[in-house]
Image: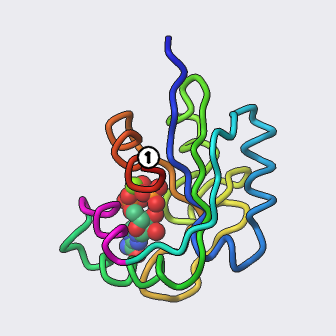
Amino acid sequence: MATEETLVLVKPDGVARGLTGAILARIEAKGYALVDIRLVEPDRARLERHYAEHEGKPFYEPLLEFMMSGPAVAIRLAGNRVIEGFRSLAGATDPTSAAPGTIRGDFGRDWGVAVQQNLVHGSDSPESAARELEIWFG
Ligand code: RTP
Ligand code: MG
């Protein structure tokens, strides 16, 4: 099986809270390979492409505002079944109910704001990964 790649983002809350290193440590400890990594300050156009599937949902505008609130870290990550593996490391979308032992479960909580601030993004399918890697790494 060909080695798979995924897009991981450390979202602005993760960078602002100084958790980038802790999150990278978990990814490296799991054994996935960092292929590329960069600090990014995404503009609205890039985020509209990235989050196109969520346009029109109640959390869409707050999500874009949140993602423009500060720098994020984009990571091209590789390994067999890395898409599924990173989603497992990240945990459930809602950090309040994400299992302890996951990035969101250990480091996240409900901050009482309009959108779930949940520290990381990971592509959810091979098609999403290809599309999103093009958006963030070209
Ligand atoms: P991601 O795309 O960031 O890896 O997360 P996900 O698949 O677990 O979640 P998804 O459903 O794709 O939602 C994208 C991001 O939107 C924010 N969100 N907030 N009700 C809410 O407040 C809400 N729902 C979604 C989260 O930041 C989520 O990761
Ligand atoms: Mg998603």
State the residue position of label 1. Answer: 133
x and y percentages locating residue 131 in the rendered image: 33, 45
- Mark 1 is surrounded, within 10 Å at the Cα level, by few (under 14), some (14 to 19) or many (20 or more) other residues, namely many
**From the viewer's perspective, is residue 68 above or below residue 75?**
below
The residue nearer to you, when weighing 27 against 68, is 68
Which region of the structure is painted magenta? 44-53
The answer to whether residue 98 is seen in the rendering is: yes
Residue located farthest toward the left when viewing the structure as drawn: 56
Residue found 50% across the figure and 40% down from its top:
6
Q: Quadrant of residue 130?
A: top left
Quadrant containing ligand 2 reads bottom left
**From the viewer's perspective, is residue 47 above or below residue 131?**
below
x and y percentages locating residue 16 in the rendered image: 69, 79
Q: Quadrant of residue 64?
A: bottom left
The residue nearer to you, when weighing 48 against 96, is 48
The answer to whether the residue bearing label 1 lies less than 8 angstroms from the nearest atom of ligand 1 is no
Residue located farthest toward the top when viewing the structure as drawn: 1
Residue found 18% across the figure and 74% down from its top:
56
x and y percentages locating residue 59 in the rendered image: 33, 77
* Magenta stretch holds residue 7: no
**From the viewer's perspective, is residue 106 above or below residue 133?**
below
* Magenta stretch holds residue 47: yes
Q: Amino acid at mark 1?
A: Leu
Secondary structure beneath dot 1 equals helix
Left or right relative to 91: residue 125: left
Magenta-drawn stretch, dominant element (helix, strand or loop):
helix
Residue found 80% across the figure and 60% down from its top:
21
Left or right relative to 59: residue 67: right
The answer to whether residue 96 is seen in the rendering is: no
x and y percentages locating residue 2 in the rendered image: 50, 15
